[in-house]
Amino acid sequence: MNPDKELRTAYRLRHLLDQGAADLPSATLDQLAAARRHALIQKKSSIKAPQHVLQTSGIKRLPAGVSHIWLNRLGLLLPLAALVLGLIGISQHAQRQRILDTAELDAEMLTDELPIDAWLDRGFDAFMNDERRRNEQ
């Protein structure tokens, strides 16, 4: 059905119902008003406000008098603590990796046939760069 046609039909129905309500006796109108108030009261009492509480399976609910504030705080602090511990672990792993890489480089330099003084000589460094360029060509 076309939305404009539906809207026009709804307006016509409302108009007809308003006209019909004007023709009803006052006792019937009072009964309808009382029934409407009763229905609204029933509807309001059946609606419950949502409760935002951390609930997990396997944990029994706390008694009604016990506060859930500590549980909410735990729900905030637990992920934060996990994040901090994860960052500390990543930092320690990276530092350990740097130490292992440096130790490996030191071991290679010490077991190399060239003396350490050759690596410290700037002229030798230039010689090695020239050798690499010649080998690449």
Image (spheres, rainbow, N blue to C red):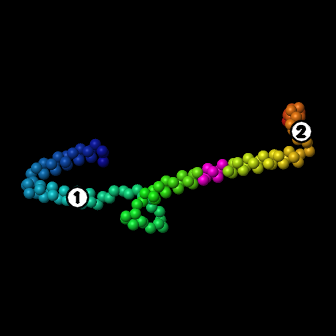
Q: Position of 39 compared to 3: left or right?
A: left
Q: Position of residue 95 (x, y in %)?
A: 70, 48
Residue nearer the viewer, 133 or 65: 65
Indicate whether residue 114 is drawn in magenta: no
Instruction: Give me the C-alpha separation between circle 1 and circle 2.
Output: 95 Å
**Residue topped by disc 1:** 41
Q: Position of residue 21 (x, y in %)?
A: 13, 51
Q: Quadrant of residue 47?
A: bottom left
Q: Residues within 10 Å of mark 1 (few under 14, many from 20)?
A: few
Q: Residues within 10 Å of mark 2 (few under 14, many from 20)?
A: few
Q: Earlier in the sequence, mark 1 or mark 2?
A: 1
Indicate whether residue 88 is drawn in magenta: yes
Judge depth for marks 1 and 2 and give the one in front: 2
Residue beneath the point at 67% across and 50% down: 92
Q: Position of residue 59 (x, y in %)?
A: 47, 66
Viewport quadrant of the C terminus: top right
**Residue topped by disc 2:** 117
Residue nearer the viewer, 29 or 4: 29
Residue beneath the point at 22% across and 56% down: 40
Q: Position of 128 compared to 74: left or right?
A: right
Q: Which residues are magenta?
A: 85-91
Give the overall secondary structure of the magenta segment: helix
Amino acid carrying label 2: it is Asp
Residue beneath the point at 28% across and 43% down: 4
Q: Position of 103 compared to 83: left or right?
A: right
Q: Secondary structure at mark 2?
A: helix
Residue 69's label in the rendered image is: none
Residue nearer the viewer, 107 or 24: 107
